Image (cartoon, rainbow, N blue to C red):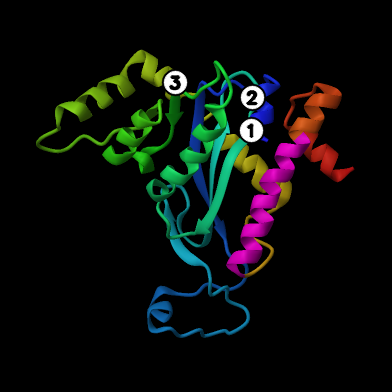
Amino acid sequence: MTHLFVCEKMIDPYIVAIDSTLLKAKGHLWHKSSMIKGIVPRSGIIDTDARWGFSHTKGWVFGYKLHMISSTGLTTIVPLAADFTTGNVQDNQMYNPMTSSMTTTTTTIPDEKICYMIGDCGYDDQKLYDLSINRGFELICPVQRYEHTTPADRLELIQFYESELGQAIYSWRSKSIEPLIEHLKSVFRIDPLPVRGYQKAAGIVLLSVLLYQILVYYNYKTRRNQEPKAIKHMLCS
């Protein structure tokens, strides 16, 4: 689907965004103390595959995580890659496989490549900066300043992020992937999840992302209407 979006000039992959969102598991909570002891107090009504994850906006959530890369800019905002994990998997752990699938897709299309990947502070990891450069693009995200000593390479990252250009690039995150994730959750009602178990939850969430991609493409080809609300209307009808 991403290959189609790029070939049809529906998106410009010059700047893309990466993010994740926690999705609440169906049923009752499995408290950490009971989880450590292997005690399931309410068998059958607790999703024992789910795990606790932390978000700066939501706090602690018992459930799963949708990891996603999306387009940005003035063109169609659409999911380009997605993966699904338990809630305890850190964002930086998924950066390698997520970006690998993206670069494989875009490098096969002449004159269309990723130059910047924007993410939140969860991706502030030197290994990820180096990995990005090796794949032909730059990772732009808030960079943590060390209290006493900051290496020269991190100072360069901080200076670029805080520059006028860096802030202009990063500003697309709040106008693209953040509202897209909320729109997906609203359209497909996947938060909280309607099923228990990792396999079932992953199936519903990833199929929702694929269906959204298909509907965006169909809507573009038949109506040339890029309004996100049209997708919800198409599903309802």
Tell me the number on the disc at residue 2. 1
Image coordinates of residue 19 in percent, x first then y, are: 49, 41
Image coordinates of residue 206 in percent, x first then y, are: 64, 51
Mark 2: secondary structure: helix
- Give the magenta range: 197-215
Three-letter code for the amino acid on which mark 2 is drawn: Val
> Would residue 135 be visible to someone looking at this image?
yes
> In front: 28, or 22?
22
Q: Is residue 119 above or below residue 157?
A: below
Task: Estimate the spatial distance between the alpha carbons at disc 2 and disc 1, rounded to whole Å.
Answer: 6 Å
Tell me the number on the disc at residue 6. 2
Image coordinates of residue 124 in percent, x first then y, are: 32, 39
Label 3 crowding class (10 Å Cα cut-off): few <14, some 14-19, many 20+? many
| Lateral position of residue 22 relative to residue 140, left or right | right
Magenta highlight on residue 202: yes
Label 1 crowding class (10 Å Cα cut-off): few <14, some 14-19, many 20+? many
Image coordinates of residue 157 in percent, x first then y, are: 27, 26
Q: Tally the numbered discs.
A: 3
For disc 3, the marked residue is: 169
Lower position in the chain sequence, tag 3 or tag 1: 1
| Lateral position of residue 4 relative to residue 49, left or right | right
